Image (cartoon, helix red, strand yellow):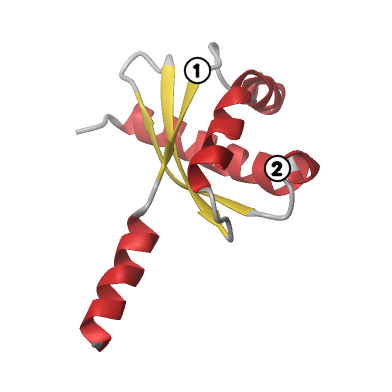
Amino acid sequence: MDSTRQQKFARLIQKEMAEIFQIDTRNTFGPVMITVTMVRVSPDLGVAKIYVSLFPVKDKEALLQSIRDKGHELRRLLGNRIRHQVRVIPELIFYLDDSLDYAERIDELLKK
């Protein structure tokens, strides 16, 4: 169970990272839609696990690796946005959220 502080911090990171992916890094990753579906923050607020959904992409693992490779740049962009609101900018760890793919697969199976 996350504390209220962790939940507020996670919502802040989710909002800011969504804007970063939507506006700042549009040219970096090409014509894909990167959605931040969930953020989990460690109790000391030092690590943020960011779950992203990628659409329309054939090779999601390659794009996820590209996002991970640009992690330092993304952390810098996040730091520029939230530096007046927090003390420490968390380390960012990116994970692929495949819940939409799973739901789509279930829907296809139900239609058969």
Residue at horizontal 56 percent and vertical 58 percent from the top: 55
Q: Which residue is mark 1?
A: 90
- Which of the two residues, 99 or 9, is positioned nearer the viewer here? 99
Question: The C terminus is located in which quarter?
Answer: bottom left
> Is residue 57 visible from the viewing direction of this image?
yes
- Which of the two residues, 91 or 10, is positioned nearer the viewer here? 91
Residue 108: x percent and y percent? 30, 79
Question: The N terminus is located in which quarter?
Answer: top left
Residue 64: x percent and y percent? 53, 38
Residue 68: x percent and y percent? 55, 27
Query: Viewed as shown, does residue 108 lie left or right of 32?
Result: left
- Which of the two residues, 96 or 57, is positioned nearer the viewer here? 57
Q: Which residue is mark 2?
A: 29
Measure how far apart labels 2 and 1 are at the Cα level.
22 Å
The amino acid beneath tag 2 is: Phe
Tag 2 secondary structure:
helix
